[in-house]
Image: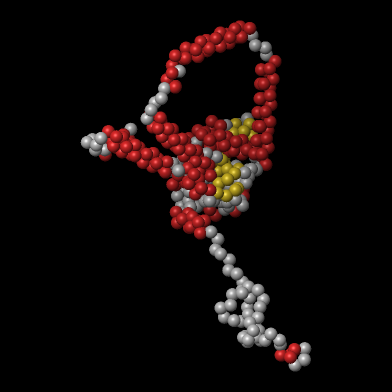
Amino acid sequence: EDHRTLASQVIDPTLDSCCQRELESEIKGNAFRRVLRRHDVVAERERRRRHLVDATGFQGCRCSYDPEQDGGEYAALNALRAATQRQMIGDTIGEAYCGFIVAPSTETDGKEHKSGEENDNNSDSDDEFDYLLDEDLGGQNEELQMIEEQRRAELEMDMLEREIELQHGYGTHRQMHPTRSLKVAGLSRGVRDPPPFVALHLFDSQSDASASLDLYLEELALQFRGTKFIRSDGHMTLALESSLAQKVLPRGRPDLPALVAIKDGVAIQTSPLKLLTDRNDNENIVKEAVHDWLRQLNVLHERPPALEALCHIRPEEAALLDHLAQSGPPPQQEEYFRCGVPGCQKTFFHQHVGLETAEQSGLVVSESQVLGEG
């Protein structure tokens, strides 16, 4: 509708109908090309790919992850994840086995047979409208194709945005190195544009409650893509970043394991996991308690930040990378043989006859050979 409104305002009504159609087609084409440029997925993906690094178990942007330190899982989480997967496989096999041994009733078969006949009748009743599919729509085909291309470009752009969000830690729950976890959460003074909402889990690598919490935070990360979920070894973090932890955490040194709620680079509250577990079962957290605690602190958000605010790589740095990628590596300068003659650029061993230099005498036959001294 936008290009039609623009066409009606721009096109001169005194022109012939053929000229008006030609101008309208040109306006539609320009609008379509603007949409494609705005949703140029290939170019944007290529620009982002230069900043990707391979961490342990995932691929992320180098502004958010260190490939040598971040990533991985701890022992208790690995054990609980394996046990959960075995239980899911066992439940699936049990349901399939139960469904296989239970014989279907004849009454159900009769109903399915009747419903099948009704579906056949309904499908036959649509035959009278089949001619509409074969009808030539004329000039509308081009417009429909443009709409399809535009919609496809928008969907591809949505997929790219989702991919970029994952590369910067949104929509997932990942492990950070103890020396980097507080800075990545935005708790350091030197952090530019800290993430607006963060849930930081300072885990105990031997705690089943920590493993239970991390599995649930992985579920929350898929639902609340506007919150960055991070975990790090609590004891190592407080030991290696003790001075920073004393300044930025609400209680200085919290009881571990603990969950920290952070907003705009400020840790607003810390909760030990013992307050989020069942009194009769300290090895498993209560999901409702964790969800309500984060919700009351207004940390859970579904909409991630804008793409411009996700990456911390400055535009001038990206432009420098573009220039280096286009110019290629500098040419290697060849090593010339030092013969002592200025301007000579021969790379192999040689001598200049008749030219005496510091490196050569300039004689084809040496003086010692002429005098017979050699």
- Residue 325 on image: x %, y %: 52, 56
In the figure, 137 relative to 265: above or below? Answer: above
**Residue ranking furthest to the left:** 14
Residue drawn 46% across the image and 39% down it: 157
Q: Is residue 241 visible?
A: yes
- Residue 281 on image: x %, y %: 63, 31
In the figure, 62 relative to 335: above or below? Answer: above
**Residue ranking furthest to the bottom:** 371
- Judging depth in this view, the residue of 26 and 35 nearest the camera is 26
Left or right: residue 53 compared with residue 20: right
- Judging depth in this view, the residue of 71 and 131 nearest the camera is 131
In the figure, 15 relative to 114: above or below? Answer: below
Residue drawn 65% across the image and 32% down it: 84
Q: Is residue 274 visible?
A: no
- Residue 266 on image: x %, y %: 47, 47
In the figure, 40 relative to 281: above or below? Answer: below
- Judging depth in this view, the residue of 56 and 300 nearest the camera is 56
Residue drawn 58% across the image and 47% down it: 176
**Which of the colour schemes (rainbow, by chain, secondary structure, one colour) is used?**
secondary structure
- Residue 341 on image: x %, y %: 59, 81
For the N terminus, which image quadrant? top left
For the C terminus, which image quadrant? bottom right
Numbered marks: total: 0
Residue drawn 54% across the image and 32% down it: 289
